[in-house]
């Protein structure tokens, strides 16, 4: 921050959330709405800092670099830059390694053995090993996610049942296609498993 001030930047900033998909409400303000709002307020230059992404992926390369950049241009923002993700930046990797080394002395033998053997470990165990901030300070609660009925009326259990029925139907259709001797041709044609129905 001091380096930015020394360079003459006042560092006006705003926070927005991306990756909203479908009709489900997401964290707000939405990035696309915020871009329009900033443009309407006369902002012509914008530097995007994707603080929650440590690597380049579809949300940085596609959503920010292409979709949001295009929206910004359409709204009148003339200069658009994105700070690259940390990726394999040496200082970042060193900090991650330091956090692991600092956590190891506090680790119980059982989780340590599970990690060494590559078995899944509860994120709660992993989070408790790193002193970034206490969960109480951040207001994080443990426990199962409290699902609510979506506006379409599907609960998580209904979603699981629906998914299993869909998998069973695809498996059955694939078996029928195979029994008719045309599974390979259907796959090559991109019609599996319903092309023959």
Image (tube, rainbow, N blue to C red):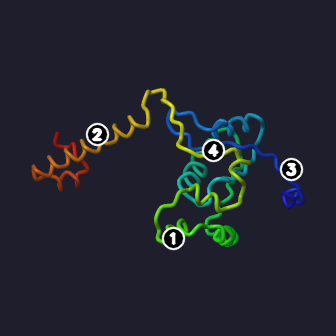
Q: State the residue position of label 4.
A: 141
Disc 4 and disc 2 in contact, CB within 8 angstroms: no
Q: Position of residue 42 (x, y in %)?
A: 78, 38
* Distance Cα–Cα, label 1 vs label 3: 49 Å
Tell me what residue is drawn at x 73 percent, y 38 percent.
38
Q: Quadrant of the N terminus?
A: bottom right
Disc 1 and disc 4 in contact, CB within 8 angstroms: no
* Nearer to the camera, 4 or 1: 1
Q: Earlier in the sequence, mark 2 or mark 3?
A: 3
* Number of numbered tags placed on the structure image: 4
Q: State the residue position of label 2.
A: 165
Q: Earlier in the sequence, mark 4 or mark 2?
A: 4
Dot label at residue 113: 1
* Distance Cα–Cα, label 3 vs label 4: 36 Å
Disc 1 and disc 3 in contact, CB within 8 angstroms: no
* Distance Cα–Cα, label 1 vs label 2: 38 Å
177 relative position to 19: left or right: left
* Nearer to the camera, 45 or 89: 89
148 relative position to 192: left or right: right
Q: Earlier in the sequence, mark 1 or mark 2?
A: 1
87 relative position to 137: left or right: left
Above or below: residue 36 compared with residue 114: above
Q: Earlier in the sequence, mark 1 or mark 3?
A: 3
Q: Kindly indicate the quadrant of the structure image that contains residue 18.
A: top right
* Nearer to the camera, 54 or 9: 54
Q: State the residue position of label 3.
A: 10
């Amino acid at each position: 921050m001091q380096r930015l001030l020394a360079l003459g930047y006042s560092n006006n900033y705003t926070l927005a959330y991306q990756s909203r998909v479908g009709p489900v409400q997401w964290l707000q303000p939405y990035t696309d709405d915020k871009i329009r709002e900033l443009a309407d307020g006369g902002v012509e230059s914008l530097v995007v800092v994707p603080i929650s992404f440590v690597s380049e992926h579809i949300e940085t390369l596609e959503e920010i670099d292409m979709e949001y950049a295009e929206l910004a241009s359409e709204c009148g923002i003339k200069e658009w830059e994105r700070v690259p993700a940390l990726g394999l930046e040496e200082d970042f990797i060193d900090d991650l390694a330091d956090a692991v080394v600092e956590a190891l002395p506090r680790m119980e033998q059982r989780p340590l053995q599970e990690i060494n053997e590559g078995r899944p470990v509860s994120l709660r165990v992993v989070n408790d090993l790193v002193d970034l901030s206490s969960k109480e300070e951040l207001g994080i609660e443990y426990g199962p996610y409290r699902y609510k009925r979506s506006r379409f009326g599907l609960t998580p259990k209904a979603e699981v049942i629906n998914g299993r029925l869909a998998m069973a139907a695809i498996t059955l259709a694939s078996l029928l296609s195979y029994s008719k001797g045309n599974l390979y041709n259907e796959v090559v044609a991109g019609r599996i498993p319903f092309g023959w129905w």
